[in-house]
């Protein structure tokens, strides 16, 4: 999930535009990690040194690692280590942005350091995403609101991003998590949760986005907005909240109950004071989650 929040980091610091990020996300899956990008991440080479080797490759039929050793930037031992390196997915997103000309290697070098520092990602073993790392990233995400990053809220967000990854795709970026007093409806379904966490959750998106969302969810190509597409949104929301219910029962010993999902017929939702909008951007469109917390 490092790549998804790296996208959020880039947008919040005005490094790239939404369109540039969408373009890179769409192309990331077809990219292969470059040796120079890994060398920058590990701190073995500077961006300028990498650029020098790339220039040298234009008139030398030689692999990057071999040239870097020849020019004294790397040792053979470092080259052998980099070949075996497990790299974080956010690094591939950064490399794609460089390949597309949206940022430079020098910018990427600085951004890697800033992103890791901001989220306290001090252990550079990215072979597995660590729970503590993800919790710190989520805590920074909650920082834009007065919502406490307690176990109820943090567990809900962790699961939501995991479910989006599992069932819709990992090519998304969370855009914002902000207070919301009212919301103009596109096509919207909602579900109410009762218990120690009492809330109403809305899932909303334009009809064209619904079609793409449903197609990914059921792994079937829909071409029009119909009852099957509508049912897919209800099913995703119910599936996610049901899994959340199970998680809370297993981890906290608390029982929550769910009402059946329903379609929102209002054109404008008037929300309580403790309501928040989460926007998640996919290449096919932006999906909106609204959380209305009950007292």
Image (tube, rainbow, N blue to C red):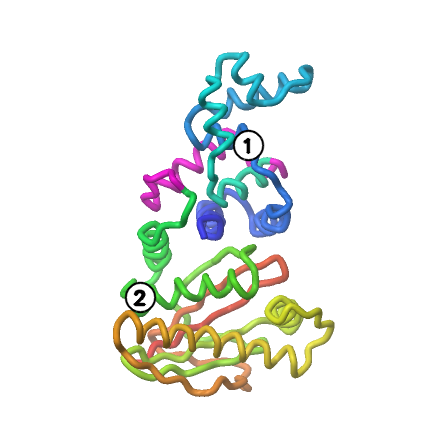
Please name the residue shown 56% across and 64% down the image: 168
Which residues fall within the magenta stretch?
99-125
Say which residue appears at 42% left-offset and 87% top-offset.
259
Name the quadrant containing residue 221: bottom right
Question: Viewed as shown, does residue 218 lie left or right of 94?
Answer: right
> 189 or 274, which lies in front?
189
Answer with left or right where residue 142 lies relative to residue 46.
Answer: left
- Place of residue 96 in the rendered image (x, y in percent of width and height, measured from the top left): 59, 40
Name which residue lies at 63% across and 51% down.
26
Label 2 close to label 1 by CB (< 8 Å): no
Tell me: residue 295, above or below residue 145.
below
Which residue lies under the disc numbered 1? 104
Quadrant where the image shows the C terminus: bottom left
Mark toward the start of the polypeptide (2 vs 1): 1
- Residue 43 higher or lower than 244, as above or below: above
How crowded is the residue under tag 1: few (<14 C-alpha within 10 Å), some, or many (20+)?
some
Numbered badge on residue 147: 2
In the rendered structure, does residue 163 fall within the stretch colored magenta? no
Is residue 295 something one can see in this rendering?
no
Query: Quick one: SS at disc 2?
Result: loop
């Amino acid at each position: 999930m490092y790549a998804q929040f790296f996208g959020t980091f880039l947008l919040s610091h005005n490094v790239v535009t939404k369109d540039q990020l969408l373009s890179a996300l769409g192309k990331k899956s077809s990219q292969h990690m470059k040796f120079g990008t890994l060398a920058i991440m590990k701190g073995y080479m500077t961006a300028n040194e990498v650029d020098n080797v790339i220039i040298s490759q234009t008139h030398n039929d030689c692999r990057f690692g071999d040239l870097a050793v020849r020019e004294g930037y790397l040792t053979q031992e470092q080259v052998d280590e980099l070949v075996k390196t497990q790299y974080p997915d956010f690094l591939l997103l950064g490399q794609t942005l460089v390949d597309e000309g949206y940022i430079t290697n020098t910018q990427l070098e600085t951004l890697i350091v800033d992103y890791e520092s901001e989220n306290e990602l001090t252990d550079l073993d990215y072979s597995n995403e660590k729970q503590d790392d993800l919790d710190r990233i989520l805590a920074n995400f909650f920082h834009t609101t007065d919502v406490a990053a307690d176990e109820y809220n943090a567990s809900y967000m962790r699961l939501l991003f995991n479910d989006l990854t599992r069932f819709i795709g990992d090519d998304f970026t969370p855009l914002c998590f902000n207070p919301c007093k009212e919301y103009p409806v596109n096509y919207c379904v909602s579900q109410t949760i009762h218990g120690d966490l009492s809330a109403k959750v809305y899932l909303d998106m334009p009809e064209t986005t619904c079609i793409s969302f449903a197609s990914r969810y059921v792994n079937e190509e829909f071409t029009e907005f119909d009852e099957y597409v509508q049912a897919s949104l209800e099913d995703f929301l119910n599936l996610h909240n049901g899994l959340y219910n199970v998680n809370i029962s297993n981890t906290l010993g608390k029982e929550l109950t769910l009402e059946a999902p329903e379609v929102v017929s209002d054109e404008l939702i008037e929300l309580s004071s403790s309501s928040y909008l989460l926007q998640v951007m996919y290449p096919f469109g932006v999906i909106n989650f609204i959380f209305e917390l009950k007292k």
